[in-house]
Image: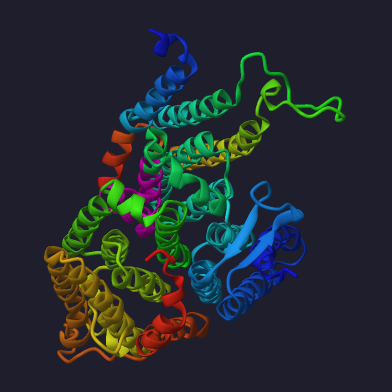
Amino acid sequence: MTLPFPILIIVVPLISAFLMIVIGWWRKSLCYPLMLAALAVSTFSSVAILIHVMAHGTLHYYLGGWDPPWGIEYVIDPLNGLVAVIVSGISFLIGISSKRLAEKDFPEKLVYFNCIFLLQVTGLLGIVVTGDVFNLYVFLEIASLAGYALIAIGEDGAPFASFNYMIYGTIGACFYLLSVGYLYVVTGSLNMADLSKILPDLYHSKVVLMAFAFFAVGVAIKMALFPLHVWLPDAYTYAPSSVSSLVAPLTTKVGAYVLIRIMYTVFTPEFALNTIPAGTILCWVAATAALFGCILALAQTDLKRMFSYVLIAEVGYIALGVGLGNRQALTGAILHILNDALMMASLFLIVGALSYKEWPRKIDAFRGLHRKMPLTMASFVITALSVIGLPPTCGFFSKWYLVLGAIEAKEWLFAAVLLLSSLLNAILFFRVIEKAYFEPVLDDPHEGKPKEMEIDEAPFTILIPLLLLTAGVLSAGLLSGKIVSGVIRFAIPATF
Amino acid sequence: MELIVGKYNYWMYILLMMIGFYAMIGKRNLVKKVVGMNIFQTSIILFFVSTAAKRGGTIPIVEHSSHGVQAFQYVNPLPHVLMLTAIVVMVSTFGVAMALILMIYRRYNTLEEDEILELRKQ
């Protein structure tokens, strides 16, 4: 018997998105509970599936009862089970916080915002659970279109940034579609498992090579890998904070998941690493991304834009792990998908909390912030330590595995790049921490004594998800041994 | 020669794709970019439909199910179906693009990329 959970993950948010419009006409106040309920069902189903998959092995769900390779199949193995839990869990937390943030930024558009928010989550989850390459394209476009719409709600530069994102995103998606077409021409199949059986006999074909090239470039655009990242900083800086805290952590991570999935399960690692030098190229590109992301972040004065560049560097780490292509590095890459999703959600939510209190986003204006918002700043410090990679937090462990992987592959240069970019991250974040904690508050010119600062935190619906995410950053670090030995060990493609 | 004439539909697909690609990257007017995007996407449809075509093939409707079906007599329906979905995606992308262009025009009163960047600097 097949469990209905794989389809519930997708269908519940999808149907709720369309119900949202109808219910919005009737009672606006019901929209927010409906969205949370849909996201909660999604989260619950994906956790249930992951537990089931860990106990009983890979789960298959045939849509409409059509057997693969003819029908569309949803396949959940430990890898995408884990990513589904990450995506649904984080979108649930961000969903909780979105109410206050959205009410403040655009009170009249709440119904449509909730609707598109759910469509975005549907798209991302669909990419993760599907076992069919064309179905993946459709979900990719659902997620992207929802993303363009959500980003365009934002402040002054947002529509233009969103338009640029759309041009790049469409090129990426079309390249992916072409790669699907090339694969279909030579194999006659769209099912991932079926493709992986047929393809090994065709690796000498130029068509397969082209398919791989189109796929790699298309996904690199979607996950904002370094030379193709140009759309990201503008789009995520100008997006409203309720949106950027959803799309920034998840879209790039789902892109990274697609990279791992197609490179190592549809194609074989043998092909991707040895027959063609894709792994080596990916490593070099990723190492450049990790360095340049940090260096460009140093040049920013706007906190949100700085985080966007940090995100580009983090994407570089994941791609480096994928490109190195050994067990340790891949463990690091998959662990970093989890860790980075938590860290980025937390960082962008902190920006949201600041902007809710109408605190300027300029780093220079952060003097004395720790007295005004002690809990927010405390979670900022913990997350920052994790991005830098200090031991009790989760960022350390994924970097540790990545460095081990680089050493195992005897790529000393990449190990050095990882350490150097951690160092740059330290400069980056301590600059902010120093401003917020150690620089004295400017004196009031009239009275000649320090200004009184009262605690003025963001409301609970923002603060609690933020604290939960921070707790996630800490506990993912403390439990990382368990996560690696219990889940990620099985999530690495079997051929390694 | 055979390579060019015999497979002219594939050459057309590459040509159209390059035109669209150039317009998306090279043109400075936002509407021209969107037009380029449409050409780009349409070229992919041409590619998919070309792969399905067969000389002398007919529409894939099986009239007499009693005989065995001869696959070479029928055009492959699957790429067409995929393209139906891709057309839906294309139309919705176009819709979102137009909505964004409207928003941009209302804000800046121009659709030239250079002028918008100039206005954004101030």
Q: Is residue B122 visible?
A: no
Image quadrant where residue B114 sits: top left
Residue A244 on image: x %, y % = 43, 63
How many discs appear? 0
Image quadrant where residue A483 sits: bottom left
**Main secondary structure found in the magenta portion:** helix
Magenta stretch holds residue A102: no
Image quadrant where residue A245 sits: bottom left
Report whether A452 appears left or right of A456.
left
Which residue lies at the image location 67% right of the left edge and 46% below the top edge? A70
Q: Is residue B120 visible?
A: yes
Q: Which colour scheme appears in the figure?
A: rainbow
Residue A88 on image: x %, y % = 55, 71
Which region of the structure is painted magenta?
Answer: A213-239
When the figure is inspected, residue A257 is found, relative to residue A463, above or below; the finding is above
Report whether A449 appears left or right of A279.
left
When the figure is inspected, residue A218 is found, relative to residue A297, above or below; the finding is above
Report whether A426 appears left or right of A331.
left
When the figure is inspected, residue A361 is found, relative to residue B96, above or below; the finding is below
Residue A367 on image: x %, y % = 22, 81
Q: In which quadrant will I find the C terminus of chain A?
A: bottom left
Q: In which quadrant will I find the N terminus of chain A?
A: bottom right
Q: Nearer the viewer, residue B86 or A195?
A: A195
Which residue lies at the image location 51% right of the left edge and 67% below the top edge? A80
Report whether B70 appears left or right of A81.
right
Q: Nearer the viewer, residue A456 or B11?
A: B11
Residue A346 on image: x %, y % = 39, 76
Q: Nearer the viewer, residue B11 or B91?
A: B11
